Amino acid sequence: MIKLNGVYPPLPTSFTEDEDLFLSRYEENIQKLCNYDLAGILVLGSNGEMVMLSNVEKKKVYDTARKAIPGGKLMIAGTGAQSTRETISLSVMAYDSGADAVLVLNPSYYKGQMNSEVLVRFYHDVADNSPAPVIIYNMPANSGLDMDADTILRASQHHNIIGIKDSGGNLVKMATVIKNAKPGFQVFAGSASFLLPALSIGAVGGILALANIAPELCLNIYNSFYEGKHESAKEYQLAAVELNTAVTRQWGVPALKAAMDYLGFYGGPVRKPLLPISDEIRKQLIELIERTLEQ
């Protein structure tokens, strides 16, 4: 069983101005982030614009990431697709590139058919055929589906399913899963906005967009909690909420990339149909970054 404890940034994919992969800048971002005490990197999650990439491009990203991520840090690879067949194929591809685990978003296009039975079968079929351990990914803001605790618990019984990244923010559901899942099943907070509450009920860490631009702040929340410095952890948590919201639910990946550019990483362009943020939003974002990091 892989221990997933810690903080992971879901790294945005780097593109040139022509929207081609910019793998040298992607590698530079990984090297800079790995100077922090992060547990690893998630590649091709929602912030990685995974749905915008061809499978050939995904393979290049997996390969580049694994070469850039140093030993001792985990590589988690997003591999969820709309069909079970393609999800398995991407999971094998990611494993062959060196992924330590795969993060699998549930299929959602045929929402009316995605009942609990279908989703449990999907995850078990993927886990049966994935050479890498599987992490469930619940992301209702993007998929339009919010898996309930019973579905997650039934899926989690598979021996090759080792955890879940839950970005829904329902702490009651998260606590239900933590309490009733098999021993060793690991739960991630999927957003820095509720990292501390999630840790307090037994989550092992977080896969956090904010960790791309404020890794030290995210680590301060995590480390203060485990060091028993609960007042400090609360202060760090409160400091994280506004900026995290800005680069997730409010302005999304274009704002996250703009923030990376401002902070000395490479953000670069998004792929259309996503559009860059406006100059006015950029101004607001920079003011928010400065205010947050001064705290």
Image: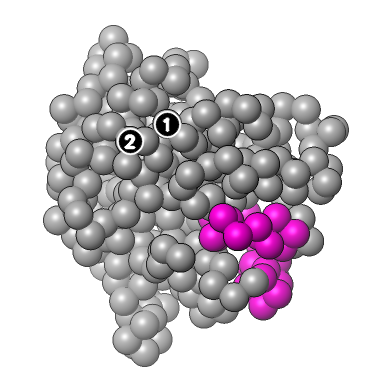
Task: Return the residue nearer the eye: 26 or 242.
Answer: 26
Say whether residue 93 is visible. yes
Q: How many labels does the image show?
A: 2
Q: Can residue 253 be seen in this view?
A: no
Question: Does residue 202 lie above or below 266 as drawn?
Answer: below
Q: Residue at x 56, y 55 (%)?
A: 160
Residue 21 picture location, percent across and down: 28, 19
Residue at image x 33%, y 80%?
224
Residue 138 x %, y %: 62, 49
- Point out the image quarter for the C terminus: bottom left
Q: In the figure, 21 relative to 224: above or below?
A: above
Circles 2 and 1: CB atoms closer than 8 Å: yes
Whether the magenta-drawn stretch holds residue 156 is answered as yes
Name the outermost residue toward the top: 18
| Label 1 crowd bin: few (<14), some (14–19), many (20+), radius 10 Å | many
Vertical order, 265 against 191 (above or below):
above
Residue at position x 26%, y 40% in the image: 66
Q: What residue type is labelled 2?
A: Ser
- Residue 109 percent coordinates (x, y): 72, 27
Label 2: state its secondary structure: helix
Provide the secondary structure element on which disc 1 rests: helix
Amino acid type assigned to the residue bearing label 1 in the image: Met
* Residue with the mark numbered 1: 93
The disc placed on residue 97 is 2
Instruction: Report the span colored magenta.
Output: 152-181
Q: How far apart are marks 2 and 1 (CA)?
A: 6 Å
The image quarter in which residue 65 lies: top left
* Front-most of residues 82 and 198: 82
Give the side of residue 232 with respect to residue 241, left or right.
Answer: left
On the image, the x and y values in percent for residue 14 come to: 28, 28
Q: Which residue is drawn at 36% across and 82% down?
A: 226
Tell me: residue 61, above or below residue 9.
Answer: above
